[in-house]
Image (cartoon, grey):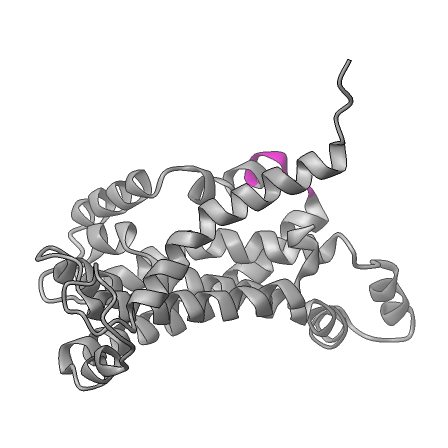
């Protein structure tokens, strides 16, 4: 009877999984430096496609729009998500605890379509404002869950001690609790910001005519075929996302355990 080395088997399957996930990403980054316009045959190293992106006014405009939308939506999501996370941890409301997972587990196309129908129902003009509201709607859940995971490691007796020493509820909340939760709050904000920058499906449904974000701009470019400029844009987004994910993991390690 054969004996299976469990440790070695796990390592092999882990390696295969990581190769499956990251080889396509490595290829995109590699071909963003390819001289060939076709992007299939390697014809030499160049930074020309990145120089083209820098001088593309439409791309810069779309990138600025994405940054502004992500900044506004993530800030608002941080405020509401932080309060929601603290409340759900303290009061343990089962129904609302399950509802907070809906924007995460439900397919994005369903979320995007439901938001579109909602905006039409209330006669809300689609544009940058509707995109911001849509991004807030799905970002709040991520911030809330990040804060809840931080609250699970928080000692509630610290607040009781502060109250016993004369601190009022408001003072104890803003001077004791919030600073203790700050790493988790920042991590949730960074996650919301990253998801907003990368989002396409929900943005596609909630954006009006003339509303262009970076993912929508890339989609319009890819309709005519994959070019080195698209590889360059994708590489920048990938690196930016990895950097943000790294900071999120450092600020809120319990989410990645």
Instruction: Please state the horizontal and vertical placement of residue 117, each as a whole percent of the image.
Output: 21, 42
Q: Is residue 257 visible?
A: yes
Tell me if residue 243 comes above or below residue 93 in the rendering: below
Which residue appears at 32% of the width and 70% of the height? 69
Which residue appears at 60% of the width and 43% of the height? 14
Which residue appears at 59% of the width and 70% of the height? 247
Relative placement, left or right, of 66 versus 229 is: right
Which residue appears at 26% of the width and 71% of the height? 34
**Magenta stretch?**
92-96
Instruction: Please state the horizontal and vertical placement of residue 241, each as a whole percent of the image.
Output: 45, 66
Residue placed most toward the observer, 124 or 165: 124
Residue 228, picture quadrant: bottom left
Relative placement, left or right, of 212 versus 91 is: left
Instruction: Please state the horizontal and vertical placement of residue 129, each as a whole percent of the image.
Output: 25, 66
Reply yes or no: does residue 191 show up in magenta. Answer: no
Total of numbered circles in the picture?
0
Rendered-image quadrant of the N terminus: top right
Residue placed most toward the observer, 40 or 183: 40
Instruction: Assign the magenta stretch its main secondary structure.
Output: helix
Residue 165, picture quadrant: bottom right
Q: Can residue 79 be seen in this view?
A: no
Instruction: Please state the horizontal and vertical placement of residue 132, each as a whole percent of the image.
Output: 31, 64
Relative placement, left or right, of 125 versus 131 is: left
């Amino acid at each position: 009877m054969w004996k299976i080395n469990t440790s070695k088997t796990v390592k092999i399957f882990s390696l295969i999984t990581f190769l499956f996930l990251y080889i396509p990403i490595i290829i995109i980054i590699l071909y963003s430096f390819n001289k060939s316009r076709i992007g299939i045959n390697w014809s030499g190293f160049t930074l020309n496609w990145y120089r083209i992106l820098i001088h593309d006014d439409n791309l810069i405009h779309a990138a600025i729009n994405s940054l502004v939308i992500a900044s506004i939506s993530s800030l608002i999501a941080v405020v509401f998500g932080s309060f929601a996370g603290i409340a759900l941890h303290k009061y343990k409301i089962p129904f609302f605890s399950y509802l907070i997972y809906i924007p995460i587990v439900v397919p994005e196309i369903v979320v995007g379509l439901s938001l579109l129908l909602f905006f039409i129902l209330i006669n809300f003009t689609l544009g940058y404002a509707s995109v911001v509201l849509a991004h807030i709607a799905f970002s709040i859940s991520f911030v809330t869950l990040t804060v809840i995971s931080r609250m699970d490691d928080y000692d509630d007796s610290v607040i009781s001690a502060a109250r016993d020493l004369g601190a009022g509820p408001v003072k104890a909340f803003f001077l004791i609790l919030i600073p203790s939760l700050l790493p988790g709050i920042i991590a949730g904000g960074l996650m919301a910001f990253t998801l907003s920058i990368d989002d396409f499906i929900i943005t596609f449904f909630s954006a009006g005519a003339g509303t262009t974000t970076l993912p929508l701009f890339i989609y319009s470019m890819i309709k005519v075929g994959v070019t080195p400029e698209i590889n360059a844009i994708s590489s920048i987004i990938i690196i930016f996302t990895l950097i943000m994910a790294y900071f999120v993991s450092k600020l809120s390690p319990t989410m990645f355990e």
